[in-house]
């Protein structure tokens, strides 16, 4: 399901992303601040937020696809990283730069994720103690994100390092 979603063309992916982001922003706004804004102000804020985030994600996704050599190659790279194995017939001149970029991102995320989500967890617990119980749910979400992001960044970093070593080794043997 996720692979099919990732391989959608941008003209199909971005409207779906806009709808998801708008629903999420509107839902969170209604839960956290139920009666503090008029409907028009809430809808305008939702459209602005969803539009800005869709544009941002559109640029990020477009750059990633272009850097990988297209949608299919990017999907192939993501599947290979998930499996932890380099397919035999890859173009190392395209794969090595993209995997190095992801390796660097994972290296930074290994220390940034615990700092970021611990801060968010602390803030949401503080707000929950003063505002209301909905923030305890958000604190639980941040706790789960802290654990998942820390574990996945560490595993991803190690997996990418092995894959890069394998690609560089095969590149040396090909010469």
Image: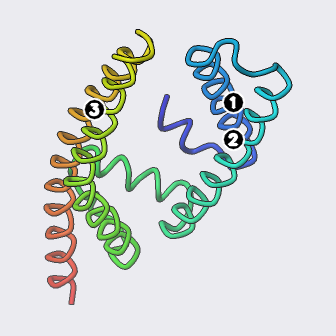
Q: Is residue 114 above or below residue 134?
A: below
Q: Residue 27 at what x, y percent from top left?
A: 62, 19
Q: Badge 2 local density, few (<14 within 10 Å), some, or many (20+)? A: some
Q: Is residue 101 above or below residue 120?
A: below
Residue 101 position by quadrant:
bottom left
| Residue drawn at (41%, 52%) of the image | 76
Q: Badge 1 local density, few (<14 within 10 Å), some, or many (20+)? A: many
Q: Earlier in the sequence, mark 2 or mark 3?
A: 2
**Element marked by disc 2:** helix
Q: Residue 153 at what x, y percent from top left?
A: 23, 48
| Residue drawn at (21%, 90%) of the image | 175
| Residue drawn at (32%, 29%) of the image | 142
Residue 13 position by quadrant:
top right
Residue wearing tag 2: 49
User: Label 1 near label 2: C-beta < 8 Å?
Assistant: yes
Cα distance in 3D space between marks 1 and 3: 27 Å
Along the line of sight, the residue nearer the viewer: 90 or 162 = 162
Along the line of sight, the residue nearer the viewer: 78 or 117 = 117
Q: Is residue 113 above or below residue 164?
A: above
Q: Earlier in the sequence, mark 2 or mark 1?
A: 1
- Disc number placed over residue 122 in the picture, else none: 3
Q: Badge 3 local density, few (<14 within 10 Å), some, or many (20+)? A: some
**Element marked by disc 1:** helix
* Left or right: residue 19 compared with residue 89: right
Q: Is residue 80 above or below residue 135?
A: below
Cα distance in 3D space between marks 2 and 3: 25 Å
Residue 125 position by quadrant:
top left
């Amino acid at each position: 399901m996720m692979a099919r979603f990732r391989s959608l063309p941008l003209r199909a992916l971005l409207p779906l992303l806009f709808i998801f982001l708008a629903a999420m922003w509107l839902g969170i706004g209604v839960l956290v601040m139920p009666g503090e804004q008029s409907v028009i102000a809430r809808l305008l804020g939702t459209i602005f937020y969803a539009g800005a985030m869709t544009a941002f994600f559109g640029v990020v996704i477009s750059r990633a696809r272009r850097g990988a050599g297209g949608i299919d190659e990017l999907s192939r790279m993501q599947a290979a990283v998930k499996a932890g194995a380099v397919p035999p017939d890859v173009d190392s001149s395209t794969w090595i730069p993209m995997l190095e970029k992801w390796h660097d991102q994972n290296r930074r995320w290994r220390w940034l994720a615990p700092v970021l989500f611990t801060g968010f967890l602390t803030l949401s617990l503080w707000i929950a103690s003063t505002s209301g119980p909905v923030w305890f749910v958000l604190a639980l979400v941040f706790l789960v994100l802290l654990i998942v992001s820390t574990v996945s960044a560490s595993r991803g970093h190690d997996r990418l390092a092995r894959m890069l070593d394998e690609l560089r080794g095969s590149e040396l043997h090909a010469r």
